[in-house]
Amino acid sequence: MFCRNCGKEVADQAVMCVACGCDPRTGKKFCQNCGVETNPAAEVCVKCGVKLATSMPADAKSKLAAGLLGIFLGGFGVHRFYLGYVGIGIAQIVVTLITCGIGAIWGFIEGILILVGTIDKDAQGRPLKD
């Protein structure tokens, strides 16, 4: 991994760059393969052609957890509560109760959609981590 501030190589687990003293995951954007500075909006390094790594927030929700919650407990809206959609979670409980359990298919289908990537964001718009 390369420091995003100065471009020097640092260990993957490093919390501080020994060359510049900053957090290596903040600042400018550098290619993790060749170390060249890149455009922050770029998806591919123009020098070596490697797909640039995207940073994932530490509190990102798991796609696998949300999908499995949807498949196994979707009738109770548990996956929606997990993702922060409280209103939809309550609606799924009500639909499941009114339909005597048949409405649970809604949560089951959403669980599958989460796992295949069709539903890929939480209630705050943050992407789900793999």
Image: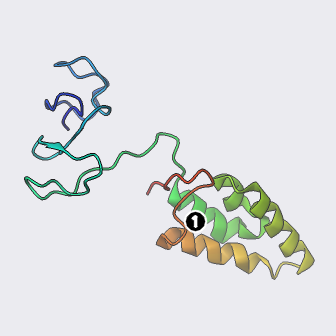
Structure colour scheme? rainbow
Tell me the quarter of the image containing the N terminus.
top left
- Seen at 72% across and 77% down, the residue is 106
Tell me the quarter of the image containing the C terminus.
bottom left
- Seen at 59% across and 65% down, the residue is 68
The amino acid marked with disc number 1 is Gly
Residue at the disc numbered 1:
67
Rate crowding at label 1 as few (under 14), some (14 to 19) or many (20 or more) other CA atoms within 10 Å: many
Q: Is residue 130 left or right of residue 29?
A: right
Q: Is residue 26 left or right of residue 83?
A: left
Relative height, residue 127 to residue 97 (above, below): above
Q: Quadrant of residue 28?
A: top left
- Seen at 46% across and 42% down, the residue is 57
Q: Quadrant of residue 97?
A: bottom right
Question: Of helix, strand and loop, which one carries label 1?
Answer: helix
Point out residue 50 in the picture as x, y percentages from the top left corner.
16, 57
Point out residue 29 in the picture as x, y percentages from the top left corner.
24, 40
Q: Is residue 14 left or right of residue 49?
A: right
- Seen at 78% across and 59% down, the residue is 87
Point out residue 86 in the picture as x, y percentages from the top left corner.
76, 55
